Amino acid sequence: MGPRARTLRSLFFLLQVLAGRAENSDFYLAGDYLLGGLFTLHANMKSTAHLDVLQVPQCQEYDMKVLGYNLMQAMRFAVEEINNHSSLLPGVLLGYEMVDICYLANNVQPVLYFLAKEDYFLPILDDYSGYMPRVVAVIGPDNSESTLTVAHFLSLFLLPQITYSAISDLLWDKLRYPSTLRTVPSASHHIEAMVQLMFHFQWNWIVVLLSNDDYGRDNSQLLSDRLAQNSDICIAFQEVLPTPEPSQALTPEEQEHLHHILFKLQQTTAHVVVVFSPELVLHTFFQEVLRGNLTDTVWIASESWAIDPVLHNLTELRHTGTFLGVTIQKVPMLGFSEFRVRRGYAGPPPPNSTGQRSTCNQDCDACLNVTESFNTILTLSGERVVYSVYSAVYAVAHALHNLLGCGRTGCTKDVVYPWRLLEEIRKVNFSLLGNQIFFDPKGDVPLRLDIIQWRWDLSQNPFPSIASYYPTHRELRDLHHVSWHTDNNTVPVSRCSKNCSPGQKKKPVGLHPCCFECIDCLPGTFLNQTGDELVCEPCPSTTWSHQRDTSCFKRRLAFLEWHEVPTIIVALLAILGFCSTLAIMLIFWRHFQTPMVRSAGGPMCFLMLTPLLLVFAMVPVYVGPPTVFTCLCRQAFFTLCFTICVSCITVRSFQIVCVFKMASRLPRAYGFWVRYHGPYVFVVSITVVKLAIVTGNMLATTTSPTARTDPDDPNIMIASCHPNYRNGLLFNTSMDLILSVVGFSFAYMGKELPTNYNEAKFITLSMTFSFTSSISLCTFMSVHDGVLVTIMDVLVTVLNFLAISLGYFGPKCYMILFYPERNTPAYFNSMIQGYTMRKD
């Protein structure tokens, strides 16, 4: 069969069941695994078995594949149990034939042989529903590439095929492979178990090594696709391992490539290596690893070599790092270990047992010796993959039991067509050694996967389980203690970059998202732990953060408060203004008919004093957090009141000038002014214009309170009425400034009037103070910001009104209270006559 035949492979176990005659029905069970060659084992009822050799190789010339031989014995064990079972298939015996696929070379020939009839003839028919091939079920092969090749043939005949080790996801395609089932979870579950293991130990920087065949390529592609869904794990590099022919040495090119791989493993910062390869490729590789003195590595084994006893027998591998693997769950099979090494003959072995007529089967001395030498490790590691073979045989047996309508004592002798058996296999559901065996819609038995560790220090179990993966829930559970090959038994670190500290974003470096720099989040931004790790998100407007914060805190809202010293000073001034204005109103009301009050404006005095009194009472609206009401008062009420007062003073100044200078020159205009109450019309007109300005300003902005960041301290939010407060204030006071200048001008023009009527000094004082304070406030607001602006605003407002209250009305009250003799009509008439005589 060529050089590939020198490696012992278990192709596939073929189950054949024939309903024979009641007395001497013959049943053939075909299994596969041998040293190289095709053989058939016949069983007549329960008589002694004998071997019919079709090819006769020399046993000692072949390498022993211990796991393959173990799988063959598992099938024989299951067949003998079923044949000896009292209730399963009573009166029916299973027979088997086995072939070796010689790794990959011998696929088509055996499957054609099993599909043919007894005369080796395979007819071409339109309908195979009534066709009876040599066998009715196939168990195997043990690798995905061979299984897919065989499945193409068997699916045409709907011949049941149950593979015990092929995990390729391509077998899920039931349109192409309708008759293929398996007793192991698919490759996707194996990959998911590996990925969740990496997530658990926070390994995000790995190396992938794969064999140069479909197994390595398919599984590495599945891993890459899975990692593409989540960028938390990156592949540092991926290499294809040299795959020599069985029993042949590496070529110089392959040896050089292997040295290149080892050099990259020694140089890389990735300390986790995932290996997808059949075990045959790895013997040479790990020999080179040992010679290369590679240490501190975590090796993650795929199911093909996760529990390989021959590789585990290389005890020096313990110095290369920690070995973890994904494999099928451990299921103890009582009596199998003794069955595996028993001899076929009761007496001594026949002479020349390893001669020309001997084959490496259950009767070969060399095979038995090799198997017996590994029997301890095979037993202690638990029956894992062999249980998949064992359960596959039992699945066929239960399906046959149902198809043949078996009872307690016997079964019907109907013809068993493969497609009918396939339907029954899909419906089986039975308990076997503590596990429920059934096939899901994808044709898989959802058995648990174990994450195992290679141990050389444990005499009881060299492959202990450290975790379990449940395909149904896609979840890794029951993680146990791991013995790491590191100092102080610490978990190995395999990361391209160190984890960033809280409050640091990742800045990618190079092509891999796992390689990055850590950048501090700036003040005002934070790193959302559940969001994008590459972006520092800005804080909401009412919150703030310090550098490297992971959340934002609420900013302190700054506004004028009662306990502050400036507030107390302004409050005292407002109280002074309120009391003094109230006293002035009482004095003017008491002496309303006196010449002093009438010369000050008469009824218009109360038009000025009332807004003054209300303004001083409303000063508290500047204290505390701004509201819609307080903002309305600040933006409209105070400026309207001030405009009324200034317009009254202005018209009063104008009226004095008209009385003494313009009455003689413009008598008609003066009469018109008096007749239509010109002073009040002027005040109302100015107030209406100011009201329109204030309303337009409010509509252009808003009366709702807002908050803005303090430019000197971003931790503070300045509470104000609207963003354009300073611009609005300047626009509102523009008319007041104009009125102040006009009032000042008229007062200056009347400086030569009689003393009792000469109010130029007082009006000039109040108007000058109002003008300069408004200019100072605007200048201050253009330089400063924050609560100081509010303090200055309310202070200037109070002082302006105090200037009017005390500066204009104060001297009048002083004269009324302390010089009553001057508050008489006679005194005023004398002052006017004296002024007139001087002018003449």
Image (spheres, rainbow, N blue to C red):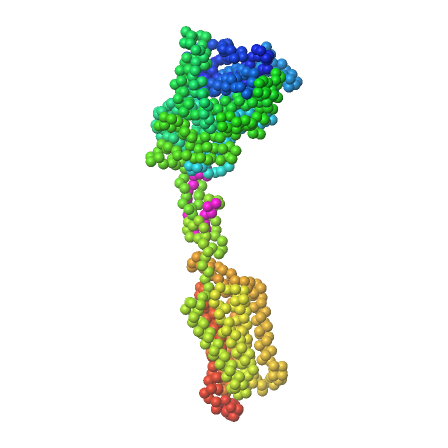
Give the residue at x 56% y 85%.
659
Look at the magenta stretch and give its main secondary structure.
loop
Residue 484 picture location, percent across and down: 37, 33
Please determine whether, in this image, residue 568 is positioned above or below residue 243: below
Give the residue at x 51% y 82%.
586
Residue 352 picture location, percent across and down: 41, 7
Please provide the residue range marked out in magenta.
Answer: 510-530
Give the residue at x 40% y 23%.
377
Please determine whether, in this image, residue 232 is positioned above or below residue 140: below
Residue 662 picture location, percent across and down: 57, 84
Please name whichever residue, 385 or 459, is drawn nearer the observer in this view of the structure.
459
In the rendered structure, does residue 810 fall within the stretch colored magenta?
A: no
In the rendered structure, does residue 517 fall within the stretch colored magenta?
A: yes
Could you tell me if residue 453 is visible in this image? yes
Could you tell me if residue 277 is visible in this image? no
**Which residue, as the protein is rendered here, is positioned at the far top?**
351
Residue 454 falls in which quadrant of the image? top left
Please name whichever residue, 42 or 514, is drawn nearer the observer in this view of the structure.
42
